Image (cartoon, rainbow, N blue to C red):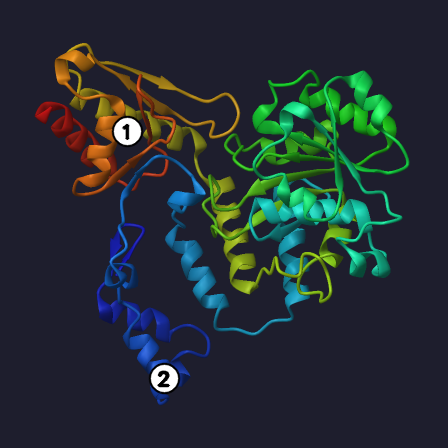
């Protein structure tokens, strides 16, 4: 069994599993023992599903990141214990709030779930009748203000609550749009440089009108300071994905912010029944895994990690430096996925292969490699931060082979 690059023999796996609370005592039971015996099985391989080296990044369709072994172990340990789920929610939320310098926090089922929970908190609050009625928002404050340029493919998570999106373009239009029906104002950090209202001004406008503000920063760590920068700026709530840069469970996310809104969010979701976000269930494994992943992320040497990413870019660059007309450049996106990406351009006439052709060849080769989806007819883009140790050398070799064959 391979966990984060560690090849573990079957005997080691069985010893580790038997040490988990309650599992060792189940040896006499055939069904649990069968599960233990099958612990080393590669189900993905058995099903024939393609695996690949991730030279793309933290895209959900590519299953984002790989959890560190310590996170996997904490989740496995939690899976063998029963706990009062609300008490664990409280304990984990309190610890995450402390770590991220926020009033309060909760673990959601991904960033989209946090958007829904945060919106429900602003619309229904802690009123049991309103909570039960969602997404029927008749008679409630049910309008959410967006900048027109900040409408995006995930705003369905906000609309799920039964709200009306009100689009504005300027601060004056926002001022005019606020009324007694305004429940929340939303800002998309990925598009912070798009639109006429900047990130700080938007937070200030929310405070001016006494309207809660939520900012989607799903893919915006690193840098680590973003965990507290937005709430210190004045945002009521901030949303992060748990399975991207933090490398927690892919099915987890974070909602950080004001204590009253986080408490209301908890009431609008699981494990509470008859709530609009009951389907956004977070169990003990994700709660524990998200906390451990966050602790590890905050504790790492971020400078050393960054230097390692730059070294991976250099390994790939050196492997293809003799390709006719090839140039390489390391670029760091200014906001989301703010990490080194390697951009490669070359003489297509001399090689006979375009960047898209190279991406296809790498995907269809062995081992399969997925490059960044922003690759186009002009350049090949490689994201190095989700690679496992040694993957950069494999990517360098394969890319060199693809261009040489062409």
- Residue position marked by numbered label 1 in the rendering: 312
* Outermost residue to the top: 325
Question: In the displayed structure, does residue 60 sit left or right of residue 349?
Answer: right
Label 2, label 1: how far apart the Cα atoms are: 45 Å
Quadrant holding the C terminus: top left
Residue 19 at x, y percent in the picture: 38, 73
Residue 405 at x, y percent in the picture: 9, 26
* Outermost residue to the left: 405
- Which residue does the image show at 41% across and 50% down from the upper left? 67
Residue 271's image quarter? bottom right
Q: Please tell me which of labels 2 and 1 falls first in the chain.
A: 2
Depth order, front residue of 306/347: 347
Question: In the displayed structure, does residue 255 sit left or right of residue 45?
Answer: right
Above or below, comparing residue 52 to residue 357 in the picture: below
- Mark 1: few/some/many CA within 10 Å (<14, 14-19, 20+): many
Residue 121 at x, y percent in the picture: 76, 48
Residue 244 at x, y percent in the picture: 47, 41
In the rendering, which numbered label is found on residue 31?
Answer: 2
- Which residue does the image show at 58% across and 31% down from the upper left? 225
Above or below, comparing residue 7 to residue 102 in the picture: below
């Amino acid at each position: 069994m391979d966990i984060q690059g560690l090849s573990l023999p079957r005997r080691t796996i069985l010893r580790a599993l038997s040490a988990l609370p309650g599992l060792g005592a189940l040896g006499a039971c055939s069904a649990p023992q069968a599960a233990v015996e099958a612990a080393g099985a590669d189900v993905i391989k058995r099903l024939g599903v393609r695996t690949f080296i991730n030279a793309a990044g933290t895209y959900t369709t590519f299953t984002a990141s790989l959890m560190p072994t310590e996170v996997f172990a904490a989740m496995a340990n939690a899976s063998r214990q029963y706990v009062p789920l609300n008490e664990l929610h409280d304990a984990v939320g309190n610890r995450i709030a402390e770590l991220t310098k926020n009033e309060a926090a909760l673990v959601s089922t991904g960033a989209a779930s946090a958007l829904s929970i945060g919106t429900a908190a602003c619309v229904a609050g802690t009123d049991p009748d309103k909570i039960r009625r969602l997404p029927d928002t008749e008679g409630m404050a049910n309008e959410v203000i967006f900048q027109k340029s900040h409408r995006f493919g995930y705003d369905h998570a906000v609309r799920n609550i039964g709200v009306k999106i009100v689009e504005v373009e300027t601060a004056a239009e926002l001022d005019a749009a606020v009324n007694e029906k305004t429940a929340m104002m939303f800002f998309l950090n990925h598009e912070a440089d798009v639109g006429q209202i900047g990130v700080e001004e938007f937070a200030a406008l929310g405070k001016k009108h006494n309207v809660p503000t939520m900012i989607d920063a799903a893919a915006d760590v690193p840098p680590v300071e973003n965990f507290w920068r937005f709430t210190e700026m004045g945002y009521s709530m901030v949303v992060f994905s748990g399975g991207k840069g933090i490398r927690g469970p892919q099915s987890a996310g974070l909602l950080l912010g004001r204590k009253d809104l986080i408490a209301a969010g908890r009431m609008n979701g699981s494990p509470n029944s008859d709530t609009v976000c009951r389907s956004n269930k977070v169990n003990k494994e994700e709660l524990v895994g998200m906390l451990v992943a966050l602790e590890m992320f905050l504790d790492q040497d971020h400078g050393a990690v960054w230097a390692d990413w730059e070294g991976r870019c250099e390994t790939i660059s050196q492997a293809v430096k003799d390709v006719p007309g090839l140039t390489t450049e390391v670029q760091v996106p200014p906001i989301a996925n703010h990490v080194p990406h390697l951009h490669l351009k070359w003489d297509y006439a001399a090689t006979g292969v375009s960047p898209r052709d190279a991406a296809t060849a790498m995907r269809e080769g062995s081992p399969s490699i997925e490059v960044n989806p922003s690759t186009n007819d002009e350049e090949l883009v490689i994201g190095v931060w989700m690679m496992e140790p040694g993957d950069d050398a494999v990517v360098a070799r394969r890319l060199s082979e693809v261009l040489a064959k062409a």
